[in-house]
Image (spheres, helix red, strand yellow):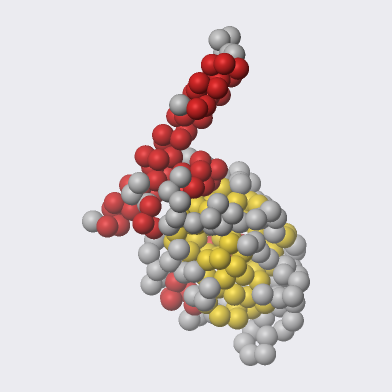
Amino acid sequence: MQQSTDDENFEALKQFDTCILADAIETCDVRLRNQGYTQPGLRCVNGEFAPVIGYAVTARVKTSNPPVLGNSFLSDHEWWPAIERWPIPRIIAIQDVDANPGLGASVGQVAAAILQSLHCVGVVTNGAVRDLHAVAKMGLPLFARHVLPSHAYAHLVDHFQPVEICGLAIRSGDLLMADCHGVVSIPLELLPRLPKIADDLLRRKRKIIDFCRSSEFSLEKLREITSA
């Protein structure tokens, strides 16, 4: 029943973008207004996608130097089955913890195919990704700071630990929404209320925009509408 209810709320939220969602969360005063979203630099690098929403599954990687143990690719046969312990849908949040993040791609088309098979609907990283066209054809959005052709020495450091992606602190199990504007963390306690709050805000914004574009526009009426 809980998963069904969550699915309904997710579908309702997908009609909005992260901007309206951020506004809706702000009205609830559950955190500071300069928290809960990614800072400049993160973008969807492989095309235009509708907003995706899912529970975070975190990992930390390094890419610039060879690993002390294991192979040089982001392939950990203990990590993949462990991902399935988390609720679906999932968004993978990968922090490149190198001093200069993004010297190697942490996700390409093979990793993307594996993650998508594990019910992941998006990847978020402060590092680099590659194989943009191939992954776009899979329908998996990649939100990253860098794009480059090589994995270099990409390898998993650990998983399910707290990460920070472009200023946003993320723990496994956090609910995230991502689109062309970036990523917003959704407080779980607000989930049942957010679709209605976001819808009310969007109606109010549309009313103001429609009035500004109408022949009846005046500053006096605008003050009345915006102060109501």
- Is residue 151 in view? yes
Q: Position of residue 22 (x, y in %)?
A: 52, 47
- Residue most extreme to the left: 1
- Residue most extreme to the bottom: 69
| Quadrant of the snapshot with the C terminus | top left
Between 183 and 57, which is closer to the camera in this rendering? 183
Tell me if 122 is positioned left or right of 129 in this view: left
Residue at 50% x, 61% y: name it. 91
Residue at 44% x, 71% y: name it. 83
Residue at 38% x, 64% y: name it. 87
Residue at 30% x, 57% y: name it. 3
Q: Position of residue 131 (x, y in %)?
A: 67, 59
Q: Position of residue 19 (x, y in %)?
A: 55, 43
Between 164 and 64, which is closer to the camera in this rendering? 164
Tell me if 69 is positioned left or right of 76 in this view: right
Residue 135 found in image quarter: bottom right
